[in-house]
Structure formats: structure tokens, C-alpha cells
């Protein structure tokens, strides 16, 4: 019996993306907990979910029958919102998919499989040194299975089912490909996240509901993009409708949505007859609230004046152009000021726990007072996003792949405004590589890593990203870490203390280090970084 040749058009693909994003949002904490490293960082589940929420934001008002046009918008949204390595790779999977199905109104099984293959090719090209046992491996095996299944005349349902089954099988093997996964007793979090996303795709194809979880769940901020935009509506209005009256029907909710669409734009009414969340940009927030009162009680009302938020951006005078500008990522008021003192033009708030999106980095690049911008990501999980940000800007962008704050500071010091771009790039990379970076933080989960048993709350000492010390006392771990970092030929030690360390404690620690290493100049500075007690630079 011949199988029905079902296809995926624009509206169905939109539904697949929305449900995939909802599944990621619903499972992001589980995915975060799978991360091998127990340090507080921008975790995989959160990064993938935020990336997909940006894609949904891009397509939420797009109505098109063409899957290729819908895929282009998803690709753009994912690229703008890409956070962390997992988010960037995810955005590239969509980018390659969109390129492979360009011009199609609908995608059959063959086109779906070709799109998956195109996504894998784009994702592998985006990573300088691809590692097997990661999201890349899972995506590749799924795409190969999809191509194989489609070649037998299967429809889109069977292709997706086969790809998911293959993905689950290879995911179980990722610990055999990456020893660090086996050591921690987990599979790859990015690969698991990809399966969660595709599960949402399958639910859309099968007509299943994700449940009462919306990607715009309670407390989630809807992205606000006002830069460079002429605002038609002044007030961003959000609220919940709860204790909904028993007589209210789904048709009443539809009518509320219709009324709100006439009163403004960016309208979202999500949830069901038990609880609704409403978002609207309008000039009459009172009218929106009055409409909603007919359905139930209002709660968590939030009204922001977007013109007030937008005004400071409009009033900033254009900075004089320079031959080169520098943009750097940092978090903590002390570290931000240090980078500014070193001549960095734009400091992007972010780093550990808060990986800035590709679009956020691109905005900083565009604000920089030069047509040539050097970017210092200062975190291994932000390098890919920084590299992708150049595609969202017309400026010439050079990313110095700094993996830590000390590397970024050393690179910024090495910059010479009189030298050529090529000379600066070489000099800054050389300076960054001469730095030994250390950090002292705490474990956010219990695990086993590098042969060490770690309990939640333990103090961790890391040198160049490698976990070397585990203990219960901040100063003892910091002392042991510093002792190992000084090899004998260094001349400078910088100690940046975080917001949870008192000044006198940091100064007392620095004095002890100075006595133990009299051959080194020891300097202590306030970094103000959250969650990391100390950051060390030894060179």
C-alpha cells in the first residue's frame, strides 16, 4: 500500500518551531542539570531555549504559506538570539536547513531530509574544531538516517520518527565518545536538547499539545526591540488573567485577542481558560485592562513606557570615528570599569551565568565608533556567538578568542592604536596566550569530575578552565590554586575579587600571596563579578 505523501508548509513549520521551543522551555532545567561542569555558567538548556524563543519572536506575526520564507525567518531569529555554543550551533542548523530548502513552498520527505543535511553542514563549518559526542554528532546521525529513510519513499512522518529514533540511539553512545561525559555519568546535554526540540516538532506533526506550558511562561520577559525603531505604540503592557469566570469560553479568549489587536500590536494571549498571560504594545493600556476584566481577575500588571526607555538611545551623540574600536564582554562593575579604563569602547554585560546573544553583541559592534571592531568575548562559551555577530553587522569584525577575563585584559593592554589591524590581531593573540587564568567559585550541583567527588556548594578552584581543587573554604582553595599557578618565571599576579568577597579579606589574601611570591608584583583590584569569589591572572 502506498504511503500518503504529506508535506510541511509554512504554517505547519511555524507550529513545529513553536512547539519545539515550548518543549525546550519546559525541559531547560533538566538539560541545565546535565551539564558536565558544575560551575555557575550559562547552561545548555537555558541557552538553547533562549535561542529558540528569539526564533519564535521573529515568526510570531509572520503569515506565509511558504516553508522557505518561514524557515528564513526562523534562521534569522535564531541567529539574533543565539547564546552560548549550543545556541550558536542550533542557529546554524536552522540556517543550513533554510538554505537547503530555499524557494520551496512545501517540503516533502526528501526536502526535509535535505534540509537536515544542510543544517549539519552549516553547523560543522561554524565550529573550528568539532568534537564528536556532542550535539553535532547527534544532528549528523539524525540527518543521515532521515536521508536514508526518505530514499525508500517514506513520508515526512516516518522520516522524522526514524531521525528521532536514531538520535536517541546515538545520544546513548555519546559518553563513549567523550570520556568527560562517562566520568560524570551523563549524555551530552546539547544532543539531548536537540532531541527535545525534535520531539516538539513531532508533536506538531501529530497534532499533540505540549501542555499548559507556554514559551512565554510566567515571569519570562518578552524581548523588547526598540533600537532604531519608530515607536507607534508607547506602552508595553503585560498582565495575567486568573480566576477566570466559569462562563468564559475559548471563543471569548479569541474575541479578547481580536479586540487587543485593534488596540495595538505585538499582541500575545497565551494559556487557556485556567490562566492567561497577555502582552500588548498600545497607547491605551487602560483599555486593554478593561477588556481583560470581562474574563477574570487581573494580576502581575506591568506597564512600561517604551518611549522613555528609548529616549536615552536617541539622545546619545554620535561618538567620533576611530580607526579601530574594541568591544568586550564582562560582568561586574569593577571589571567593566577596568576594561573602560583600558580603552575598550563598548562593554557588553555578560559572561558566566549570562551569555549575551549574538544580536546583543552585534548591537555593541554597531554602536562602536569605528568601521573596524575588535571583539573580546572573554569566555569560551561566547566565542562562537561573537564570531556569528559579525554576520549581523556591515562592519569589519575581528574576534580575538579570549577564553577568560584575564586573557581579555591582557589582549586589551596589548592593543596599539597606531599599529595595523593585522599587527594588533597578532599581538593581542600572543598576549592572551601568555596569561595563566584562574578562578574560584562554587558547585551548583553534585557530580564527579576529574576523579573528584563534588557536593553542591563545594568551593572549586579552576586553572585555565580545568578543575584542580575542591574544598569547603574559599581562602584555602584560592591559596592552593594560586600556589600551583605560579610556575617560577612569572612576574605579575593580578587578583580580582568578586562582589561576595570583602575588601579587607581580598587585601589580606593578596598580602599572603605577595609574601609567598616576592619575585612577583601582586596587585588586587575589585572586580565585582557575581558567583566567582576570585579571578586570577598570572603572567
Image (spheres, helix red, strand yellow):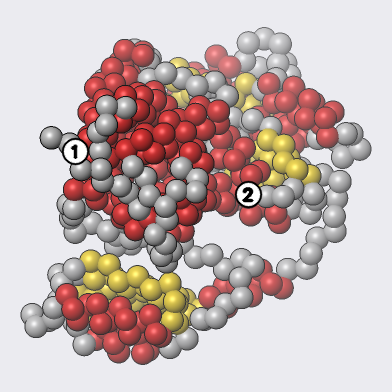
Q: Residue placed at 13% from the left, 81% from the top?
A: 248
Earlier residue among tags 1 and 2: 1
The spot of residue 289 in percent (x, y) is 32, 85
* Residue underneath mark 1: 3
Instruction: In the rendered structure, find residue 310 and report the number of the disc placed on it.
Output: none
Circle 2 packing at 10 Å, graded few (<14), some (14-19), many (20+), is: some
The spot of residue 501 in percent (x, y) is 50, 41
Circle 1 packing at 10 Å, graded few (<14), some (14-19), many (20+), is: few
The spot of residue 437 in percent (x, y) is 59, 25
Q: Is residue 371 above or below residue 313?
A: above
Q: Residue placed at 47% from the left, 80% from the top?
A: 235
**Residue 250 visible at all:** yes
Q: Residue placed at 69% from the left, 72% from the top?
A: 314
Q: Nearer the viewer, residue 464 or 190?
A: 190
* Residue underneath mark 2: 392
For marks 1 and 2, give the one nearer the viewer.
Answer: 1
Q: Which of 168 and 42 is in front in this view?
A: 168
Compared across the picture, whether 39 is left or right of 510 comes to left
Amino acid at each position: 500500500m502506498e504511503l500518503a505523501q504529506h508535506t510541511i508548509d509554512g504554517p505547519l513549520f511555524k507550529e513545529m518551531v513553536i512547539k519545539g521551543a515550548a518543549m525546550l522551555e519546559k525541559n531547560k532545567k533538566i538539560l541545565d542539570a546535565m551539564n558536565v561542569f558544575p560551575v555557575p555558567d550559562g547552561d545548555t538548556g537555558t541557552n538553547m531555549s533562549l535561542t529558540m524563543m528569539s526564533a519564535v519572536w521573529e515568526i510570531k506575526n509572520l503569515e506565509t504559506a511558504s516553508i522557505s520564507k518561514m524557515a528564513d525567518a526562523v534562521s534569522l531569529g535564531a541567529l539574533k538570539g543565539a547564546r552560548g555554543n549550543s545556541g550558536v550551533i542550533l542557529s546554524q542548523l536552522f540556517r543550513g536547513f533554510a538554505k537547503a530548502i530555499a524557494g520551496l513552498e512545501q517540503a516533502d520527505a526528501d526536502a526535509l531530509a535535505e534540509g537536515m543535511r544542510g543544517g549539519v553542514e552549516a553547523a560543522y563549518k561554524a565550529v573550528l574544531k568539532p568534537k564528536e559526542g556532542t550535539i553535532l554528532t547527534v544532528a549528523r546521525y539524525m540527518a543521515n538516517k532521515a536521508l536514508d529513510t526518505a530514499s525508500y519513499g517514506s513520508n515526512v512522518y516516518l522520516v522524522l520518527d526514524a531521525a528521532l529514533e536514531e538520535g536517541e540511539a546515538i545520544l546513548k553512545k555519546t559518553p563513549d565518545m567523550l570520556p568527560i561525559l562517562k566520568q560524570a555519568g551523563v549524555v551530552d546535554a546539547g544532543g539531548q536538547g536537540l532531541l527535545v526540540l525534535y520531539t516538539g516538532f513531532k508533536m506538531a506533526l501529530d497534532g499533540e499539545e505540549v501542555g499548559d506550558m507556554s514559551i512565554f511562561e510566567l515571569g519570562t520577559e518578552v524581548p523588547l526591540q526598540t533600537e532604531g525603531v519608530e515607536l507607534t505604540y508607547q506602552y508595553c503592557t503585560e498582565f495575567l488573567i486568573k480566576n477566570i469566570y466559569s462562563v468564559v469560553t475559548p471563543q471569548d479568549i479569541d474575541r479578547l485577542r481580536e479586540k487587543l489587536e485593534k488596540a495595538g500590536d505585538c499582541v500575545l494571549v497565551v494559556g487557556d481558560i485556567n490562566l492567561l498571560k497577555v502582552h500588548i504594545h498600545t497607547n491605551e493600556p487602560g483599555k486593554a485592562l478593561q477588556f481583560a476584566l470581562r474574563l477574570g481577575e487581573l494580576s502581575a500588571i506591568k506597564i512600561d513606557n517604551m518611549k522613555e526607555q528609548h529616549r536615552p538611545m536617541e539622545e546619545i551623540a554620535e561618538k567620533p570615528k576611530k580607526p579601530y574600536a574594541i568591544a568586550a564582554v564582562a560582568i561586574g562593575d569593577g571589571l567593566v570599569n577596568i576594561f573602560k579604563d583600558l580603552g575598550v569602547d563598548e562593554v557588553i554585560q555578560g559572561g558566566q551565568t549570562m551569555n549575551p546573544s549574538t544580536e546583543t553583541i552585534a548591537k555593541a559592534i554597531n554602536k562602536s565608533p569605528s568601521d573596524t571592531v575588535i571583539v573580546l568575548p572573554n569566555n569560551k562559551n561566547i566565542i562562537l556567538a561573537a564570531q556569528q555577530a559579525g554576520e549581523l553587522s556591515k562592519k569589519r569584525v575581528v574576534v580575538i578568542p579570549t577564553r577568560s577575563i584575564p586573557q581579555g585584559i591582557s589582549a586589551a593592554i596589548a592593543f596599539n592604536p597606531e599599529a595595523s589591524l593585522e599587527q594588533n590581531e597578532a599581538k593581542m593573540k600572543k598576549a592572551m596566550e601568555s596569561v595563566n587564568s584562574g578562578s574560584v567559585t562554587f558547585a551548583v550541583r553534585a557530580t564527579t569530575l576529574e576523579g573528584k567527588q563534588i557536593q553542591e556548594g563545594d568551593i572549586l578552584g579552576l586553572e585555565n578552565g580545568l578543575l584542580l581543587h575542591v574544598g569547603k573554604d574559599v581562602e584555602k582553595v584560592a591559596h592552593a590554586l594560586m600556589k600551583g599557578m605560579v610556575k617560577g618565571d612569572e612576574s605579575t599576579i593580578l587578583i580580582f575579587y568578586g562582589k561576595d568577597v570583602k575588601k579587607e579579606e581580598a587585601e589580606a589574601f593578596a598580602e599572603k600571596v605577595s609574601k609567598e611570591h616576592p619575585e612577583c608584583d601582586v596587585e588586587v583590584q575589585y572586580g565585582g563579578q557575581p558567583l566567582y569569589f576570585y579571578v586570577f591572572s598570572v603572567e
